[in-house]
Image (spheres, rainbow, N blue to C red):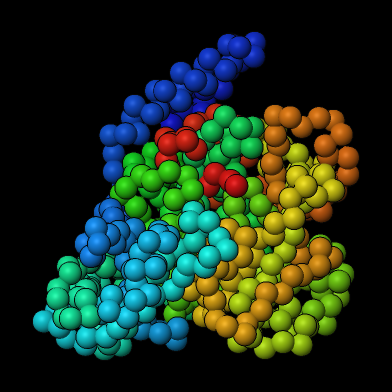
């Protein structure tokens, strides 16, 4: 099956006939334009779709304000029974709702089970783009088997304001100790984004190998054949579910929508969630000997990402119910050539590009709103545990145009052994020579760019 409009074989032949850099770039541009034409013609529906979200659902408020929910998520189970109405941040709406006379209520049809709408966020110390304004409508547990819900909103006087719909496919999710949200894939001109498809299968195989039990995969707008073929391989195994947004917001909105939607899909099913680990970020032991001591063992379990979070909490003498997140640092690595796995790269910088910002695993039950680098709304009296690099660290494979020879002075082959294992898994999974597979994916440009919208690019 072709990865784009051209087959890998045809592309390889053409590349051999165009040895010059300029000719090669022109050929890849033609291939990209050709595949874009085909990609925009199809819309993919999958039996593993957990939800399809048609667009923003709007409810008018007073004082010329309007609620605009980008997603509505049914949540049932150990983390509560409610419908989450997810909204991008708005200081005006948040301030409006602080007045008791503007309090909102929700219910089912015919005003069944009327209840106050619970509101979470935002905080004054963050910018609007970094925060959500989430509304939770408590719902009868007896309706947990349903797949379609209509939520009616009314004001404090009982005046009907409108309704929103929530849909999901029941039965796809099980119980997981660890899961991850998988960003959409897009392209931009920065060198760190220009092989976006190449990183996706490597990251999925590596993460699955080391204990991530479920992937919440996100797509937006049109889904091109390359994305579809790759995702179907993992969806069919039951390792992933897909959430598809029909609308096509900009990059920042997409990332925020994924984290918030994913959090509420995970509630009731997942204990620890990686909400913002990008496809160029590979979480690994900092020092295997020290990490193994968490289990009282001589070696680290292969599926350590399944249980490491609970072991860290125990090692720190805390209780899981008192920890909202566990955060870790990143090292920036030089990108690998197009025909090699990123994990074969062995040159890194001392820090993640000089940035101290961490990534994290969220304790799903204790948080209500997320940002890229830490939870924004969470249960009071809970804490974040920042682990030492000797325990956990992430390899961030990100090259920049301004990088020079001195940017990556440190030799570090920590993931070479994993790279060999992942390469063999990819060969078996896709039935292709891995170098050929990766080079073909690197040469295929995603449907969307970072400046437009998507079908994960990396942050």
Quarter where residue 262 is shown: bottom left
Q: Is residue 264 above or below residue 190?
A: below
Q: Nearer the viewer, residue 39 or 388?
A: 388
Residue 243 drawn at (x, y percent): 38, 58
Q: Is 228 on the left-hand or right-hand side of 309?
A: left
- Count of labels shown? 0
Residue 72 drawn at (x, y percent): 32, 66
Q: Is 214 on the left-hand or right-hand side of 355?
A: left
- Residue at 52% across, 35% down: 187
Q: Is residue 326 visible?
A: yes
Q: Nearer the viewer, residue 21 or 137?
A: 137
- Residue at 32% across, 80% down: 100
Q: Is residue 319 above or below residue 31?
A: below
Q: Is residue 81 above or below residue 282?
A: below
Quarter where residue 362 is shown: bottom right
Q: Is residue 108 above or below residue 387?
A: below
- Residue at 74% across, 70% down: 386
Q: Is residue 172 visible?
A: no
Q: Nearer the viewer, residue 105 or 396?
A: 105
Residue 424 drawn at (x, y percent): 66, 49
- Residue at 11% across, 81% down: 110
The quarter of the rendered structure image containing the N terminus is: top left
Residue 222 drawn at (x, y percent): 34, 41
Q: Is 443 on the left-hand or right-hand side of 55?
A: right
């Amino acid at each position: 099956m072709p990865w784009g409009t051209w087959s890998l074989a045809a592309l390889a032949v053409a590349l051999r006939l165009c040895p010059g850099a300029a000719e090669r770039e022109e050929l890849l541009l033609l291939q990209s334009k050709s595949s874009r034409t085909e990609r925009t013609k199809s819309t993919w529906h999958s039996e593993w779709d957990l939800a399809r979200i048609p667009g923003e659902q709007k409810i008018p408020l007073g004082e010329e304000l309007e609620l605009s929910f980008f997603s509505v998520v049914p949540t049932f189970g150990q983390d509560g029974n409610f419908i989450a109405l997810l909204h991008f941040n708005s200081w005006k709406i948040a301030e409006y709702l602080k007045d008791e006379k503007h309090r909102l209520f929700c219910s089912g049809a015919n005003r069944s089970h009327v209840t106050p709408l619970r509101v979470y966020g935002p905080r004054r110390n963050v910018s609007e783009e970094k925060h959500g304004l989430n509304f939770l409508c408590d719902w009868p547990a007896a309706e947990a088997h349903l797949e379609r819900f209509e939520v009616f909103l009314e004001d404090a006087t009982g005046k009907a304001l409108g309704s929103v719909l929530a849909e999901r496919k029941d039965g796809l999710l099980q119980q997981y100790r660890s899961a991850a949200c998988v960003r959409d894939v897009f392209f931009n001109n920065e060198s760190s984004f220009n092989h976006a498809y190449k990183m996706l299968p490597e990251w999925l195989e590596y993460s699955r190998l080391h204990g991530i039990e479920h992937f919440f995969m996100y797509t937006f707008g049109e889904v091109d054949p390359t994305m579809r073929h790759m995702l179907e391989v993992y969806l069919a195994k039951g390792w992933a579910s897909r959430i598809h947004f029909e609308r096509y917001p900009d990059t920042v909105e997409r990332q925020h929508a994924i984290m918030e939607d994913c959090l509420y899909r995970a509630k009731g099913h997942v204990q620890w969630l990686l909400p913002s680990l990008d496809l160029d970020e590979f979480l690994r032991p900092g020092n295997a000997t020290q990490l193994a001591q968490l289990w009282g063992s001589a070696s680290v379990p292969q599926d350590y990402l399944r249980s490491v979070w609970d072991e860290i909490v125990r090692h720190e003498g805390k209780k899981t119910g008192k920890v909202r997140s566990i955060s870790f640092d990143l090292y920036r690595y030089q990108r690998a050539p197009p025909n090699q796995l990123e994990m074969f790269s062995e040159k890194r910088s001392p820090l993640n590009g000089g940035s101290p910002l961490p990534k994290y695993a969220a304790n799903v039950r204790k948080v209500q709103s997320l940002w890229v680098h830490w939870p924004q709304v969470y249960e009071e009296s809970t804490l974040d545990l920042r682990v030492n690099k000797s325990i956990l660290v992430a390899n961030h494979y990100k090259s920049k145009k301004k990088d020079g020879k001195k940017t990556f002075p440190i030799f570090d082959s920590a993931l070479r052994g994993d790279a060999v294992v992942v390469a063999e898994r990819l060969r078996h999974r896709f039935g292709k020579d891995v170098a050929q597979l990766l080079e073909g994916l690197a040469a295929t440009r995603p449907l969307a760019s970072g400046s437009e919208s998507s079908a994960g690019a990396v942050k």
